[in-house]
């Protein structure tokens, strides 16, 4: 078997986790095969570890396959129960050292500073210390919860030592990027706060070095879905084209699901459209309980990647009234860009975090947390908006979302020149 000539390793929470960055990893991996990489590895977690963490997961028997040349590696834990958390990290780091020991030029990309960037940093240090002299280039991508959950929680709790470690880990990579301009600004603001407390210089380094790399989306999987396939998917679910409002995202407070369910009870259009809540997440059971007396609210917990664009294309409106919470702020909004590509009814959302970057000027915007305003906005879209207005929003939304196509994002991130 011939040795690969160029390798890409992405350390990430990959499928089956329902997470935008799982999709990012898949899309970057697929494009890499067309850009000169002949060995692509997704370095991720054993499925039992993901299940025990309580993460929202896709059905294991309905995961889309990867192309030949992409390998998903799930190293087993190292050691026994006496090392409760470090065992899995040791497995990930150890496997990466084995890959770096091979004389193959390698790019290592991490998504989530905690813990994937640390895994890559430790593996590179170990490989060099062992004398393997790896030909490796590292890229660290700070995603939303790196900042809104991890770094910000450190600062709220006065744990400046932990925040220092996180920023040092990030900046130790050869290249550092953020998932949106909003995320970049938040990184710099957090660094300024650490600098003021500790006398460090993280903010200056972040301003100089952090670039923006938006989430890569497989536009071809969403644009112009087959009308017959849309109708068939809706028929299987007992839905009718243009007769439902769609929420398709992680079912969590920060996504505005509570606001949407309450607002739906106030809408004039509720007799014309059902509300479809598609997804799983920590708030699912509570939201089900809230809606148990309302037979106009439908829950779908088994939507796979193939069905997603079909449901998006058939809806009367897509509502994601995301709102800032202490542990999460929408730092981009991948589902919003996917919906824009798929077509269908207008997007109704907020300007929380980086959402404006995802939707541009082609969405109906409401104030985060304004339940009455949300109800009015859905009513306007469903009952009052003309066909011409709807078509204009759809065309502009798709044009904006095409800038996030995975090929263009990959080439920008990996600095590949195109004609």
Image: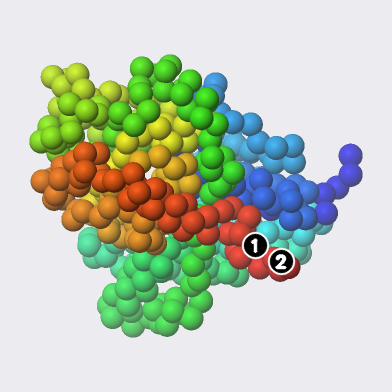
Q: Would residue 322 appear left or right of 414 to someone viewing this image? A: left
Mark 1 secondary-structure assignment: helix
Q: How crowded is the residue under tag 1: few (<14 C-alpha within 10 Å), some, or many (20+)?
A: some
Q: Would residue 97 appear left or right of 224 to someone viewing this image? A: right
Residue farthest to the right, as pictured: 2
Which image quarter holds the N terminus?
top right
The residue located at (60%, 70%) in the rendering is 174
Mark 2 vs 1: CB contact within 8 A? yes
What is the C-alpha distance between the residues marked 2 and 1? 8 Å
Residue nearest the observer in this picture, 229 or 3: 229
Q: Which residue is the site of mark 1?
A: 411
Residue nearest the observer in this picture, 277 or 13: 277
Which image quarter holds the C terminus?
bottom right
Q: Position of residue 272 (x, y in %)?
A: 22, 28
The residue located at (83%, 54%) in the rendering is 5
The residue located at (55%, 31%) in the rendering is 226
Q: Position of residue 77 (x, y in %)?
A: 55, 36
The residue located at (58%, 59%) in the rendering is 409
Q: Which residue is the site of mark 2?
A: 418
Q: Position of residue 112 (x, y in %)?
A: 47, 54
Q: Is residue 82 above or below residue 210?
A: above
How many marks the image carries: the answer is 2
Residue 402 in sight in this render = yes
Mark 2 secondary-structure assignment: loop
Camera-nearest label, 2 or 1 = 2
Q: Is residue 66 above or below residue 410?
A: above
Q: How crowded is the residue under tag 2: few (<14 C-alpha within 10 Å), some, or many (20+)?
A: few
Colouring scheme applied when the structure was drawn: rainbow
């Amino acid at each position: 078997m011939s040795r690969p000539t160029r390798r890409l390793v992405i350390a990430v929470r990959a499928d089956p986790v329902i997470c935008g960055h799982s999709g990012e990893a898949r899309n970057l991996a697929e494009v890499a095969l067309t850009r000169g990489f002949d060995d692509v590895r997704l370095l991720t977690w054993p499925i039992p570890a993901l299940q025990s963490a309580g993460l929202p997961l896709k059905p294991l028997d309905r995961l889309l396959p990867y192309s030949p040349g992409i390998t998903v590696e799930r190293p087993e834990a190292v050691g026994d129960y006496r090392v409760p958390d470090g065992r899995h990290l040791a497995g990930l780091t150890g496997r990466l050292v084995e890959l770096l020991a091979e004389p193959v030029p390698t790019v290592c990309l991490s998504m989530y500073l905690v813990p994937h960037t640390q895994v890559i940093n430790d593996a590179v240090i170990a490989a060099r210390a062992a004398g393997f002299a790896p030909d490796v280039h590292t890229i660290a991508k700070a995603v939303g919860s790196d900042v809104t959950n991890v770094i910000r929680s450190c600062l709220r709790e006065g744990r400046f030592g932990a925040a220092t470690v996180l920023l040092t880990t990030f900046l130790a990579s050869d290249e550092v990027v953020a998932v949106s301009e909003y995320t970049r600004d938040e990184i710099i603001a957090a660094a300024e706060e650490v600098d003021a407390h500790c006398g460090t210089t993280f903010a200056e380094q972040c301003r100089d070095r952090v670039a923006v790399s938006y989430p890569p989306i497989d536009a071809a999987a969403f644009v112009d879905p087959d009308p017959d396939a849309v109708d068939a998917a809706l028929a299987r679910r007992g839905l009718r084209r243009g007769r439902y409002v769609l929420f398709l995202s992680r079912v969590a407070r920060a996504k505005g699901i509570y606001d949407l369910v309450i607002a739906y009870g106030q809408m004039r259009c509720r007799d014309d459209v059902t509300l479809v809540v598609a997804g799983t997440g920590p708030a699912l059971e509570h939201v089900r309980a809230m809606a148990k007396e309302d037979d106009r609210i439908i829950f779908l917990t088994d939507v796979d990647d193939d069905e997603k664009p079909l449901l998006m294309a058939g809806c009367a409106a897509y509502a994601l009234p995301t709102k800032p919470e202490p542990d999460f702020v929408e730092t981009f909004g991948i589902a919003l860009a996917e919906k824009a590509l798929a077509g269908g009814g207008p997007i109704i959302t907020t300007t929380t975090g980086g959402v404006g970057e995802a939707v541009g000027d082609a969405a109906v915007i409401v104030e985060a947390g304004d339940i009455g305003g949300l109800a009015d906005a859905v009513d306007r879209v469903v009952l009052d908006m003309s066909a011409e207005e709807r078509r204009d929003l759809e065309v502009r939304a798709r044009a904006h979302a095409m800038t996030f196509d995975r090929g263009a994002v990959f080439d920008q991130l990996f600095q590949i020149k195109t004609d």
